[in-house]
Amino acid sequence: MVKLKTDREIDEMRAAGRVVARALAAVREAADVGVSPLDLDGVAREVLREAGATSPFLGYRPRFAPVPFPASVCLSVNDAIVHGIPGEHPLQDGDLVSADFGALLGGWAGDAAISFTVGRARPADLRLIETSEAALAAGIAAAVPGNRIGDIAHAIGATCRAAGYGVPDGFGGHGIGRSMHEDPGVPNEGPPGRGMTLRPGLVLAIEPMLIAGGTDDYTCDADGWTLRTVDGSRAAHSEHTVAITTDGPRILTAL
């Protein structure tokens, strides 16, 4: 069921979104050669603690997962697309990291993701990240009253395909509010003018995921969570929580 939010409720969601933004900024600043993803999970948890917030990721177990997610942040490195479990293996020079993080504060959820490089960046990785951010911006620009979910999907997909990148089949964004995942689903590709009409009060997590090699296929690691490219090419992920308003899209997870 789709749940529209009042202006006051959107303001309350913005508070959760600020926590998400601060945590992602802290993770990015702490990430360096020799630092482990597990160390970065500790950084994210500290931001939650200081804000009096909790993690919607930690202990989350959807139907597909064999075990609950064991961390507060998804950290996907290089050919990992999404849902990477933070481990102890140190980051290496040139690694591409996608960090996906959520927070619960005052009964409301926020969810966002960024991708960045550690050490000396490969030009191809920078282009991939820039395109993921451009796809996110295109999706957000389409998130206006009167448009449809398909208009967001088309804007994202067109940006990714024009750059020659793949879009993981079956994965995309979602509604968000009292819980991290609500209706409706927000595909990362599809025809415009289809799907639910966007109305003020709808809040969506819009999140393009790109595969550098151009394929849409992926595999899942033995951990039951980490999605990985089949060709070994790198991936990037960008996400914001966005409210549909009469004044245009309002990004709730911006710094």
Image (cartoon, rainbow, N blue to C red):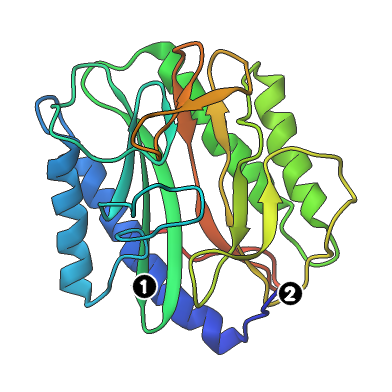
Is 23 above or below relative to 12? above
Q: Measure the C-alpha gap from mark 2 to mark 1.
A: 26 Å
Given the image, on which type of amino acid does mark 2 rest? Answer: Thr
Q: Do the numbered discs 2 and 1 sit on residues whose CB atoms are within 8 Å?
A: no
> Which comes before the other along the chain, label 2 or label 1?
1
Instruction: Classify residue 33 as left or right of residue 94.
Output: left
- Provide residue 161's location: percent of width, then percent of height: 70, 23
Q: Which residue is mark 1?
A: 104
Instruction: Classify residue 32 as left or right of residue 162.
Output: left
Q: Which residue is mark 2?
A: 246
Q: Quadrant of the C terminus?
A: bottom left
- Provide residue 36's location: percent of width, then percent of height: 14, 34
What SS does tag 1 mark? strand
- The quadrant in which residue 175 appears is bottom right
Crowding near the residue tagged with mark 2, few <14, some 14–19, many ≥20 C-alpha atoms within 10 Å: few
- Provide residue 140's location: percent of width, then percent of height: 64, 52
Residue at 49 percent across and 72 percent down: it is 179
Is 50 above or below relative to 143? below
